[in-house]
């Protein structure tokens, strides 16, 4: 049996972070601990770019843009969706997770899901506690490991090199008709 594992060495790696401003009392803690974990692993401040977006629903679009830019080894998505009294929670949670996965698959780089989906505010606060189990720090560690796993697979010929997603064709042009 051959076992492949990614290391936690982040020296020379670059990371984009997309963090929601909504539920800032939670997301700010996730972001702070995520950045701390990256720098502790050897990432320089210059190798981290943070983009704040209004809410969790906006995370996938920006994550996709960062992932396709070619500037980052991985993109980390941070947010907090807390259940309320309406079905809004299910819609947002489902589409955010789907969009983050799609961004990763299209860009062929790790796009990490660090979005809390909790039943209560207390659960969200607990998962963002820097003294306990902070999911922002976990997302950073996952990103580092996944970058190293992908590099290992690529080096061994087991993985595709990251490719930008194909650009959409403009309406009204067919593949057979040349540009004027």
Image: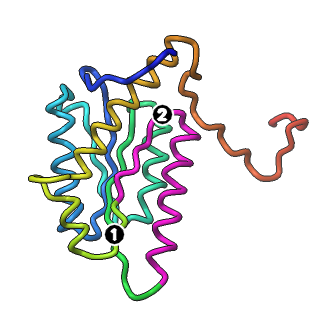
Q: Quadrant of residue 85?
A: bottom left
Direction from residue 126 to residue 156 in the image, left or right: right
Residue 100: say if magenta.
yes
Q: Quadrant of the C terminus?
A: top right
The residue positioned 57% from the left and 33% from the top of the image is 164
Closest to the observer: 120 or 179? 120
Residue 64 on image: x %, y %: 49, 46
Q: Main secondary structure of the magenta part?
A: helix
Residue range highlighted in magenta: 87-115
Residue 10 on image: x %, y %: 26, 25
- How many numbered callouts? 2
Residue 169 on image: x %, y %: 73, 45
Q: CA distance from mark 2 to mark 1?
A: 27 Å
Quickly name the residue at label 1. Answer: 118
Rate crowding at label 1 as few (under 14), some (14 to 19) or many (20 or more) other CA atoms within 10 Å. Answer: some
Q: Measured along the vertical axis of the image, is residue 115 above or below residue 156? A: below
Label 1 sits on a secondary structure element that is strand
Q: Measured along the vertical axis of the image, is residue 129 above or below residue 44? A: below
Label 2 sits on a secondary structure element that is loop
């Amino acid at each position: 049996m051959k076992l492949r594992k990614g290391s936690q060495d982040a020296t020379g790696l670059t990371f984009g972070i997309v963090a929601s401003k909504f539920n800032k009392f939670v997301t700010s803690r996730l972001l702070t601990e995520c950045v701390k974990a990256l720098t502790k692993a050897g990432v320089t401040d210059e190798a981290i770019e943070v983009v704040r977006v209004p809410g969790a629903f906006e995370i996938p679009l920006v994550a996709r843009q960062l992932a396709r830019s070619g500037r980052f080894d991985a993109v980390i998505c941070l947010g907090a969706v807390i259940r309320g009294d309406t079905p809004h929670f299910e819609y947002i949670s489902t589409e955010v997770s789907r969009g983050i996965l799609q961004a990763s698959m299209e860009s062929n780089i790790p796009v990490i899901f660090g979005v809390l989906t909790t039943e209560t505010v207390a659960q969200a606060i607990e998962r963002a506690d820097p003294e306990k189990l902070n999911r922002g720090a976990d997302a950073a560690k996952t990103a580092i490991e996944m970058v190293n796993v992908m590099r290992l697979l690529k080096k061994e010929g087991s993985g595709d090199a990251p490719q930008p997603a194909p650009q959409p064709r403009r309406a009204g042009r067919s593949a057979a008709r040349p540009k004027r």
